[in-house]
Image (cartoon, rainbow, N blue to C red):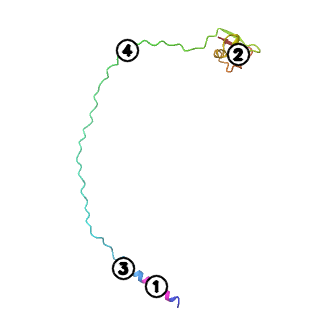
């Protein structure tokens, strides 16, 4: 019996609630009548666009001719001409050879492109001397 009373109360509440929702569903909601008006679209006036005018054709005046003498061509600096050669002997160094010939190791190396380092000369090698 204890369970029967709450079941009856819940069942009656459900029936009453369902009856109310059915009534609410059957009555359609009608909005208040409102008049909607759409303003007419503005009429665009035609726009006159003139055709592009072609650019006038002009011929440029000939450039004045100026006769000029070519600038003298300077000779590129070249390596000093070798006037003599030296045959490397056992015990020779490039700095000693340069001192003996009153020149520098840089000048000797400039005349002899095969010498990459001042300490890399060999017996029997012919060196061009300034």
The residue beneath circle 3 is: 23
Looking at the rendering, the stretch of residues picked out in magenta corresponds to 5-15
Please state which of the two labelled residues, at mark 2 or mark 3, is closer to the viewer: 2
* Between discs 2 and 3, the one toward the N terminus: 3
The residue beneath circle 2 is: 95
Please state which of the two labelled residues, at mark 1 or mark 2, is closer to the viewer: 2
| Mark 2 closeness class: few <14, some 14–19, many ≥20 residues within 10 Å | some
Q: Position of residue 73 (x, y in %)?
A: 49, 13
Q: Position of residue 100 (x, y in %)?
A: 71, 10
Please state which of the two labelled residues, at mark 2 or mark 4, is closer to the viewer: 2
Q: Secondary structure at mark 1?
A: helix
The residue beneath circle 4 is: 66
Q: Secondary structure at mark 4?
A: loop
86 or 52, which is in the foreground?
86
Q: Quadrant of the C terminus?
A: top right
Please state which of the two labelled residues, at mark 4 or mark 1, is closer to the viewer: 4
Seen in the picture, residue 44 relative to 27 is either above or below; the reply is above
* Between discs 4 and 1, the one toward the N terminus: 1
């Amino acid at each position: 019996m204890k369970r029967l009373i709450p079941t009856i109360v819940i069942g009656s509440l459900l029936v009453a609630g369902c009856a109310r929702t059915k009534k609410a569903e059957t009555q359609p909601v009608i909005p208040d009548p409102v008049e909607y008006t759409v303003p007419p679209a503005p009429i665009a006036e035609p726009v006159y666009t003139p055709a592009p005018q072609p650019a006038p054709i002009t011929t440029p005046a000939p450039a004045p001719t100026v006769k000029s003498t070519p600038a003298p061509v300077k000779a590129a600096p070249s390596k000093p001409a070798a006037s003599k050669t030296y045959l490397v002997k056992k015990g020779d160094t490039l700095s000693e050879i340069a001192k003996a010939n009153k020149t520098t190791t840089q000048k000797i190396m400039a005349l002899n492109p095969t010498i990459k380092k001042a300490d890399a000369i060999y017996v029997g090698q012919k060196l061009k001397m300034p």
